[in-house]
Amino acid sequence: MGQTHVAAGPEVDVVAASAVGPQETGRLVTETRADLSVFGPDIVAKAAELIARYPESRSALLPMLHLVQSVEGHVSQAGVRFCAERLALADAEVAAVVTFYTMYKRKPCGEHLVSVCTNTLCAVLGGDAIYERLRNHLGEGGEPLKHEETSGTPGEPGSITLEHAECLAACDLGPVLQVNYEFYDNQTPESAVELVDALRRGEKPAPTRGAPLTDLRSVELELAGFFPEDEATYRSHVDGPSAAVETLRGARLAADRGWTAPTMPENAPALPEVEKK
């Protein structure tokens, strides 16, 4: 068997000994400084405001990741470094959080993020079929989109990033999908295609429930905790229908029939004794 490693030492030519190409090896062994200039004074000020909300600065990490994602449409290496420097964390600590939560994206996203629920109930009701239809409809050159791939140029008007999502907590309205985390209920493959085509034309169809539709980066800024100060503008951004008829059907049926939950007794009964062996 041939030798599979080279002993380390100052005289070793790392590039020549590498199993990968010279360009990739150079990238791995060369220390680079992330360019933080994309995060201007307004973002620096917002980051400071977020940190001031918490007794421990590291507690601001989740909203700060949404803040940097509102700038670039994803969490870049620069975004990781920006958060790490301000929160006195290691880059690895920040990256561990970014890669754990699915709402933080490592590749640039489109103007809109379309999330199709493919968990059990939505899947059997048609979620899988919706996802496959959108993959093929949004793909190019006969190649369907893959999970978290973008149709169009990321960030440009009309661009769409498609993903399959785990349970979106709307089983009574399945199959469902979200656009920038706003709900579109009772979907079909045909209605889903109509929806993404409208998005690509620059339209913003009203969600079934939730706030009026906007673009992903604006939503990320709101998820970071920043909203318009003017009350009327704020209301226009967040107000919308919330509960659906299907969701309230059980409560209304109980009210019509006079059903109530049993009241808690003033003195709860003692727990049964567990026989010791």
Image (cartoon, grey):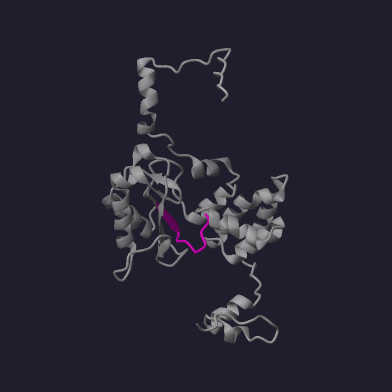
Quadrant housing residue 203 = bottom left
Query: Quick one: which residue is furthest to the top in this view?
Result: 266
x, y (%) of residue 209?
A: 41, 40
* Quarter-of-image position of residue 137: bottom left
Q: Is residue 246 above or below residue 50?
A: above
Q: Is residue 237 above or below residue 194?
A: above
Q: Is residue 41 visible?
A: no
Give percent across and percent down for residue 123: 32, 47
Q: Position of residue 151 (x, y in %)?
A: 38, 64
261 displayed left or right of 28: left
Q: Is residue 23 visible?
A: yes
User: Where, quadrant-wise, is the C terminus in this rendering?
Assistant: top right
Q: Quadrant of residue 231?
A: top right
Horizontal side of residue 89 vs 124, given as left or right: right
Magenta region: 104-115
Give the x, y percent position of residue 67.
Answer: 59, 55
Residue at point 62%, 53% (across, down):
64
Q: Which residue is rendered at x = 64% and y = 81% of the image?
A: 7
Asked if residue 29 is positioned above or below residue 161 in the image, the reply reads below
Give whichever of 201, 254 is nearer the camera. 254
Number of numbered markers: 0
Q: Name the foreground residue: 191 vs 40.
A: 191
